[in-house]
Image (cartoon, rainbow, N blue to C red):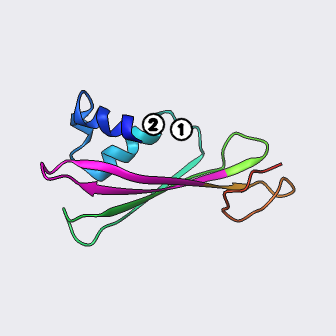
Amino acid sequence: MASFNDFLAGSGESYAHAPITVVTEYLRLDEATAASTAVVVRAPSEGRSPVTVEVTLDRLLDDSVRALRYVLDLQRSAEGTWRLRSATVTQRCWPGRGHTRFSPEPCV
């Protein structure tokens, strides 16, 4: 995460001006192979910090993992750009391949 924030402070500065662009670049959503992608942003008010972004990639092209859910927390810096504070990932398995609720546990 520190190296990604270093990227945002340097050559990736153009992504650092909005939480959604930070998350899109961090997760490389332009390369996602999910049939469905959902993005939910939770913020106290526009431009305020901290912000939580939840991204769910569903119906993945995988025989065990059906979906991945990322929860990312971002903080606005003194310069007005955004930095990633934390990122967690959980997964949901296809029926018969493990748990069918989002969990950090692996699928079969």
The residue singled out by tag 2 in the image is 28
Q: Are marks 1 and 2 in contact (CB under 8 Å)?
A: yes
Element at label 2: loop
Q: Residues within 10 Å of mark 2 (few under 14, many from 20)?
A: few
Q: Name which residue type carries label 1.
A: Ala
Magenta: main secondary structure: strand
| Residue 82: mark in rendering | none
Start-end of magenta stretch: 67-89
Mark 1–mark 2 distance (CA, rounded to whole Å): 7 Å
Determine whether, in the image, residue 5 is placed left or right of residue 89: left
Residue 48: x and y in percent read 20, 65
Determine whether, in the image, residue 21 is placed left or right of residue 56: left
Image quarter for residue 10?
top left
Determine whether, in the image, residue 21 is placed left or right of residue 102: left
Residue 41: x and y in percent read 37, 62
The residue singled out by tag 1 in the image is 32
At 70% from the left and 65% from the top, the residue drawn is 101
Quadrant where the N terminus is found in the figure = top left
Residue 83: x and y in percent read 29, 48
Q: Residue furthest front?
A: 2
Q: Name which residue type carries label 2.
A: Arg
Q: Residue furthest top?
A: 11
Q: Is residue 64 magenta?
A: no
